[in-house]
Image (tube, helix red, strand yellow):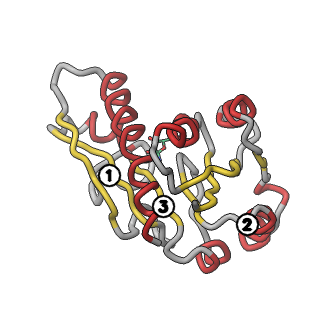
Amino acid sequence: MKKVAVFASGTGSNFENLVISQKGIENCNYSIELLIVDKKDAKAIEKSNKLGIPVYFIDPKLYQKKELFEEAVLTILKESSIEFIALAGYMRILGATILNCYKDRVVNIHPSFLPEYPGKDSICRAFSDKCKTTGVTLHYVDSGVDTGKIIYQERIHIDPLWSLLHLEESVHEIEHKIYPYVLNKICKIF
Ligand code: GRF
């Protein structure tokens, strides 16, 4: 069983789903031990409290350098013997301080079929461009923006009659289906 920390900045639906899914996976290989948030109003905080998972808000504004911010995060991870990091809507690029300590042990979920639409607002941009398809990607995290090695992807066909909201819901549905499954597989092999 690998001890996992989730990092989030917003709603936290993937975080919540990763926690809840642990119980449904037979011989689950991961355990969500804590949540790190970098925004004090992140909805993920409420979800964490409801689920009884410790949550740590670390304010980047209190640190003059990214390295110092990441060292504060690392201290928490080390105190809880965290072995693996799962990003879920974390809106910050990880620096060398964390990546060197967790080499090949950080994954992210991204709402597009990478390398299409890296970065922010991927769902909205695919919708505005009237794409016929988009997707969801799980990838290892490197120092770039959504550039790490791809682990798993699923395509979503976009019906031209769909609203943006419908597309967003479809993307999240796929995310919630695949993230626990893929994290479980990775935690088994590494
Ligand atoms: C998801 O769409 C994820 O792919 C992206 O950020 C969003 C987070 O959603 N990286 P939530 O906070 O887990 O609801």
Instruction: Tell me where residue 69 sits by quadrant.
Output: bottom right
Residue identifier under label 3: 107
Q: Is mark 3 on a helix, strand or loop?
A: strand
Alpha carbons under labels 2 and 3: distance apart: 18 Å
* Identity of the residue furthest to the front in this view: 27
Q: Is mark 2 on a helix, strand or loop?
A: loop
Residue 189 at x, y percent in the picture: 43, 69
Residue 47 in the image: above or below residue 61: above
Could you classify mark 2 by the number of other residues whose Cα lies within 10 Å: few (under 14), some (14-19), or many (20 or more)?
some
Q: In this view, does 2 lie to the left or right of 163?
A: right
Foreground of the two, 189 or 175: 189
Residue identifier under label 2: 81
* Identity of the residue furthest to the right in this view: 62
Between marks 3 and 1 in the image, the one whose residue lies nearer the viewer: 3
Residue 187 at x, y percent in the picture: 49, 63
Label whose residue precedes the other's in the sequence (1 or 2):
2
The amino acid type of the residue labelled 3 equals Val
Q: In which quarter of the image is the N terminus?
A: bottom right
Between marks 2 and 3 in the image, the one whose residue lies nearer the viewer: 2
Could you classify mark 3 by the number of other residues whose Cα lies within 10 Å: few (under 14), some (14-19), or many (20 or more)?
many
Label whose residue precedes the other's in the sequence (2 or 3):
2
Residue identifier under label 1: 117
Q: Is mark 1 on a helix, strand or loop?
A: loop
Q: Which residue is drawn at 40% across and 59% down?
A: 185
